[in-house]
Image (cartoon, grey):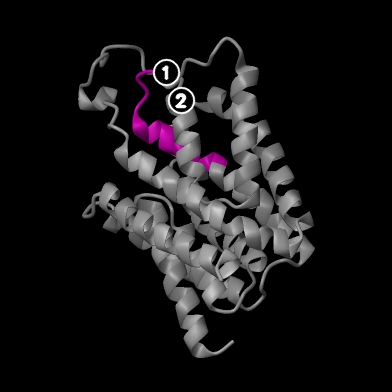
Amino acid sequence: MDLTRAALLAGAAAVAGVINAVAGGGTLVSFPAAIAAGLSPLSANATNAVALTPASLASAWAYRRELARDYRVLGVLFLPSLLGGIVGSALLLVTPQRVFDAAVPGLVLVATLLLLWQNLRPATPSAKDGGAGAGAAEDFALPSRPWLVFLLQFLVSVYGGYFGAGIGIMMLALLSSFAGNVDIHRMNALKTVLATLINGVAAIAFLFAGAVDRVATPIMMAAAVVGSLAGASVARRIEPRKVRWFVVVLGLVLTAKLGWDRFGA
């Protein structure tokens, strides 16, 4: 791999690390960069999942204090996340290259629309914001039928193991449905840990299957960790919504380009 492609991969992975730390959606930057560097879409997806996992682990560790109150919810969502990650990564590995190539524009569009939905969705006041119900008990209220939560988390995890972009937004939406007055930071903690589990399971499967690019992976991995660490300071200066708007525009352009390359004249 020449220096130009290596620099492209490193820069994109670093930016993805920053974006994931600030707002989420960094895969929409690093995935197309891997394709531009010469990787096939399937290899780019697998390489991206492996390369961004260490940065996700660092973020999950940073949330360990917030998790202290929510081990019960984590216990409910752990198994479907594990199983879904396994199923999703297995589906990717058995999917013919041409089928995945055809699905990529749609997958990128789904992830982009999730970011758009999150930006357009009104902010929900939390207890710390003094919103309505600020005096209510700050605890998750799991539904009387937890199998529904299990099923929804499993489906999100299958998608995450298969492609990955946008799973954080999907999980925040699911957690919000029974979060009550729980602080957003606690929901983010659960989302980060579960996303790390899903991506980690997929990364192990991709490594054993030899689906990752051995040259691109360490370059992207090191850069993503640096970007993730830098994102902690950037997050204090940049509004996440503005970062997501940038990624939404990028995702729409990328969807159009991938769709034209695959289905255009």
Q: Is residue 194 above or below residue 97?
A: above
Report the residue at 24% width, 16% height from top: 132
Identified by mark 2, the residue type is Arg
Report the residue at 72% width, 45% height from top: 86
Identified by mark 1, the residue type is Asp
Q: Residue 2: image x %, image y %?
A: 55, 90
Quadrant (top left, top right, bottom left, bottom right) of the N terminus: bottom right
Q: Is residue 238 left or right of residue 4?
A: left
Q: Which residue is mark 2?
A: 69
Q: Which residue is mark 1?
A: 139
Quadrant (top left, top right, bottom left, bottom right) of the C terminus: bottom right
Q: Is residue 159 above or below residue 137?
A: below
Q: Residue 168: image x %, image y %?
A: 48, 42
Is there CB contact under 8 Å for labels 1 and 2?
A: yes
Which picture quadrant has residue 195?
A: top right
Q: Residues within 10 Å of mark 1 (few under 14, many from 20)?
A: some
For marks 1 and 2, the one nearer the N-term is: 2
Q: Which residues are magenta?
A: 180-194
Residue 239's disc is none
Q: Is residue 133 above or below residue 208?
A: above
Q: Residues within 10 Å of mark 2 (few under 14, many from 20)?
A: some
Report the residue at 28% width, 57% height from top: 233
